Image (spheres, grey):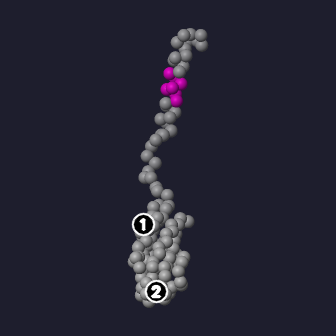
Amino acid sequence: MFTTTSPDFFPKRTILALLASMAMLSACGGGGDAGPDVLPDSITITALDGPSGGQVGQPVALNVKVATTGGIAASEISYTWLQDAGAPVARSSQGDGDYESTLSFTAAQTGSVTFKVTASARGKTASQSKSVPINP
């Protein structure tokens, strides 16, 4: 029998403690498969396209495309187009599709027109601006 004064007591006690710890860790199932990783909700503007210039009285179209994570569906996304700069223009339409939106407008005078588009879903937003010079 071992006593606390026995020279072999501490090494055996240490080994027993390690074995007990390993048994408890393996019983909890640590490190098992928790299933597929789920990405958090996010929305990103991947492109904001439009002409490099327009003409007075002629329609101009701007198109934004977005990408999402977290399973955000195209039907959940709302788009807001705001004119940031330039003389007021006549908006002729806004069409929303699968992960994109198009704004059409016609300028009545020369100068630069800037629009900012914001895409929103599930409390996440992404914004980008585009300027279009309008020529006579």
Residue bounds of the magenta highlight: 15-21
- Find residue 126 and report its horizontal and vertical position in percent: 51, 66
Please tell me how crowded label 1 is: few (under 14), some (14-19), or many (20+) other residues with Cα within 10 Å: some
Q: Are marks 1 and 2 in contact (CB under 8 Å)?
A: no
Q: Residue at x 52, y 28 (%)?
A: 20
Q: N-terminal of the two: label 1 or label 2?
A: 1
Q: Which mark is residue 34?
A: none
What residue would you read off at disc 1?
46
Q: CA distance from mark 1 to mark 2?
A: 25 Å
Q: Secondary structure at mark 2?
A: strand
User: Residue 129 in magenta?
Assistant: no
Viewport quadrant of the C terminus:
bottom left
- Residue 22 at what x, y percent from top left? 49, 30
Disc 1 residue type (three-letter)? Thr
The amino acid at mark 2 is Thr
Which residue is drawn at the image coordinates 50% and 76% (left, top)? 115
Q: Can residue 99 be spotted in the picture?
A: no
The spot of residue 81 in percent (x, y) is: 51, 77
Task: Relative to 57, say whether 35 is above or below.
Answer: above
Q: Is residue 110 visible?
A: yes
- Relative vertical location of residue 48 with respect to residue 30 in this rendering, above or below: below
Q: Residues within 10 Å of mark 2 (few under 14, many from 20)?
A: some
Taking 71 as reference, is 113 above or below it? below
Secondary structure at badge 1 equals strand
**Closer to us: 54 or 47:** 54
> Which quadrant is the N terminus positioned in?
top right
Per the image, the residue denoted by label 2 is 106
- With 84 as the anchor, is 45 left or right in this view? left
